[in-house]
Structures are given as C-alpha cells and as structure tokens.
Image (cartoon, grey):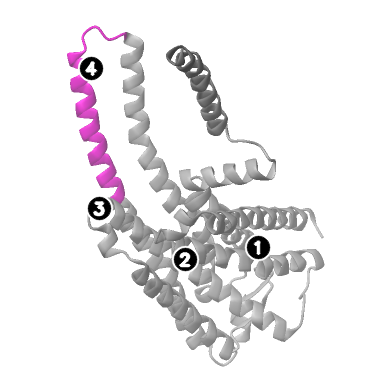
C-alpha cells in the first residue's frame, strides 16, 4: 500500500464509523419518539437511513478491503450481490432525498392543506415507486452481468469490462440510470428548495417590515437592543439560505464527481487515475455520513430525543424537570405558612 491508499483507507474507515453511529442514532430516535413516527417525512427518513446502514455494512467494507489488499476481495457471486446492492441502495437513497424535498415544498408552500395533500398512504406509494425504480435498474444490471469488481473504484459496482459484446446497451443503460436518478433528483431538489427559499425570504421581508416599523415607533429604545434586532434580521435571512444550500450542496458535492466520472468513463477511452476513481467513490459514500445530520439529527425533535436518551442512559434528570421540581418545592414552601395562617 502506498501513502494514497493508506489515506483513502483511513477516509473510508472514518466514513463507516460516522455513518454507523449517526444512522443508528436516527433509527433509535425514530423508534423511541412516537411523534417522529407519526409524521409523514419520518417514512422517507427511515427509508434513507435503511439504505445508508446497508451501504455501511455491505459496500463500504468491501471497498476498504479492496484498498487494503489491492485486489479483488470475495468471489464472483458475492461481488454480484454487492454490486446489486450498490446500484439499488444508491438509487433508492437519491429518490428518497427527492421525496423529502417534495414533502418540504408542500409543507412550506401549502401549509394549510399539507395534511390533506401528503398522507401516509401517499408516502407509502412514493416509497413503493422508489423501490420499484431501484429494483428494476439493479436487477437488469445483475441479470446482464454488468456488475463486477471495478478496479477504478475499488468496489463491486457497474463495470464496463463485464459488458463484452453489449457495450452499446451498457452505455444506454448507464446514461438512463444516472439521468433518471441523479439528474432527476437534482432537478427536483433545485426546483422544490428554491421555491421553499422564495417563500422563506418573503416571510422574512414581512417580519423585517414589522420589526423596522416597531423600531421607528420605539424612539426611546436602547441602541444595543436596536442592534440586536437588526442582527437577528440578518441571521433570519441567512438561516434559510444556509439550510437550502446544505440540502442541495451536499448532494452536488458528494454525487456529482462520481456520476461525471462514470459518464466520462463511457465516452473517453483514455485511462482514468484509480486514485481519482476511489476519491469519487468515497465522496459518494460520505453522503451516507452526512444525511443523518442534514435531514434528522440537527432538527429540534431529534436533538430533544437524543438528549432525553442520553439523560436516561446516564440516569440524569433533564434541566427542565429539575427546574420545574425546584419551582414546585419553592411554591409549596411558600404556600405552607399561608395555609397554616389560614388554618389558625
């Protein structure tokens, strides 16, 4: 192993550990909190978590083994199974992100009719489509023996070398796969989240107008308070932009190099550096580590659930409950002399 392979192996190992811990945390929060289970987006999040966990225990360890041994780990049948899972899980995860973006768009743009437009039945139908879509592409690739160990990516995945005699069909299949998964998901993410950003900015402008009118009326307000209000305005405007940039940016950064390399590999006969291929594959894997934070763990419900679970494991009382208990004790102590005086 050279220095680049050592760094790549350490990177993949770190991705595996972070992905396992974060996705298991999301799964525990989902099972522990009934409010999260009742929400429609919880089904899409659960499906995305399921795909990420399977990716952690199937494809990522095989890539790590390929980097360490610098060879083909496992037999042909095992590699076919892992290649099937690679296509299925990656496609399913992308479509789950598209479903989450559509759900958020409906929730923000149509808040009053959201519960009538997006129901659990609709979520199940959407998940059924993602599974059928993913199964069709992965099954076709496996039945045509288009999956195998690809040394460029050090993993069992779609392999042009396995498509001898059917190069044209393999090219059409690969272009269709990435067009109907990556490109379709990217378009959905951009359209829906930009609509969400537009609505968020409109609401921010309304709040800013009300805030400025209030500041004008309050002539005697302290300059520090006025400055805090103006700073909050700027933070409010940036908050929505940061969130939307995170949703779209992580998808583009993680998947675009891998997909572009796949397309270039089809139409450019020249050799591609294996180090670049492994790097693009690692970036695609890193999406499984970032998804729990982007879609779940940074939200208030999940943070609250994690805090409750940690306090329960450590057998500590939450700060709110201790403060409530002290307030109750203080109130009872104050009421005791009053009751005694009334009784006398």
Q: How many marks?
A: 4
The answer to which of marks 2 and 4 sits earlier in the sequence is: 2
- Up/down of 310 relative to 36, above or below: above
Task: Kindly report the distance in space between the C-alpha atoms of the residues bearing marks 2 and 4.
Answer: 46 Å
Give the magenta-colored segment's residue range: 196-222
The x, y position of residue 308, in whole percent, is 58, 43
Q: CA distance from mark 1 to mark 3?
A: 40 Å
Asked whether residue 158 is in view, the answer is no
Could you say whether the residue bearing mark 4 is in a helix, strand or loop?
helix
Which picture quadrant has residue 175? bottom left
Residue occupied by mark 4: 215
Q: Position of residue 134 (x, y in %)?
A: 48, 77
The N terminus, quarter of image? bottom right
Q: Residues within 10 Å of mark 2 (few under 14, many from 20)?
A: many
Quickly name the residue at label 1.
278
Judged by depth in the image, the label closer to the viewer, 2 or 4, is: 4
Give the structural element (helix, strand or loop) at label 2.
helix
Q: Earlier in the sequence, mark 2 or mark 3?
A: 2
Q: Residue at x 59, y 81 (%)?
A: 160
Which residue occupies the extreme top position in the image?
Answer: 220
> Residue 110: x, y in percent?
23, 55
Q: Which residue is mark 3?
A: 109
Question: Pointer 2: what residue?
Answer: 94
| Residue ID at (62%, 70%) | 271
Counting other residues with Cα less than 10 Å from the Cα at mark 3, is it few (<14), some (14-19), or many (20 or more)?
Answer: some
Is 4 magenta? The answer is no
Q: Are marks 1 and 3 in contact (CB under 8 Å)?
A: no
């Amino acid at each position: 192993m050279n220095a680049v392979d050592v760094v790549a192996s350490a990177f993949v190992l770190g991705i595996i550990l972070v992905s396992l811990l974060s996705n298991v945390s999301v799964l525990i929060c989902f099972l522990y909190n009934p409010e999260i289970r009742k929400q429609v987006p919880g089904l899409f999040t659960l499906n995305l978590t399921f795909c990420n966990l399977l990716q952690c225990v199937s494809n990522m360890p095989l890539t790590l083994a390929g980097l360490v041994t610098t060879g083909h780990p496992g037999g042909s049948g095992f590699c076919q199974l892992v290649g099937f899972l690679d296509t299925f899980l990656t496609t399913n995860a992308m479509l789950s992100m598209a479903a989450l973006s559509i759900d958020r768009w409906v929730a923000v743009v149509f808040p009053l009719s959201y519960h009538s437009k997006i129901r659990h039945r609709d979520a199940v139908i959407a998940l059924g489509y993602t599974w059928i879509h993913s199964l069709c592409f992965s099954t076709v690739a496996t039945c045509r023996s288009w999956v195998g160990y690809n040394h460029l990516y050090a993993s069992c995945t779609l392999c042009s070398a396995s498509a001898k005699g059917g190069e044209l069909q393999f090219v059409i299949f690969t272009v269709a796969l990435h067009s109907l998964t990556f490109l379709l998901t990217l378009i959905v993410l951009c359209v829906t989240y930009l609509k969400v950003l537009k609505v968020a900015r409109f609401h921010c402008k309304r709040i800013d107008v009300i805030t400025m009118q209030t500041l004008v009326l309050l002539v005697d307000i302290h300059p520090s308070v006025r400055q805090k209000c103006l700073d909050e305005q700027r933070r409010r405007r940036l908050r929505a932009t940061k969130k939307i940039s995170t949703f779209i940016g992580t998808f583009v950064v993680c998947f675009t190099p891998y997909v572009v390399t796949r397309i270039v590999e089809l139409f450019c006969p020249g050799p591609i550096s294996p180090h670049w291929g492994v790097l693009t594959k690692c970036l695609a894997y890193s999406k499984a580590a970032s998804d729990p934070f982007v879609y779940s763990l940074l939200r208030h419900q999940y943070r609250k659930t994690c805090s409750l679970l940690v306090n329960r494991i450590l057998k500590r009382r939450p700060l709110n409950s201790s403060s409530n208990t002290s307030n109750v004790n203080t109130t009872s102590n104050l009421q005791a002399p009053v009751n005694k005086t009334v009784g006398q």
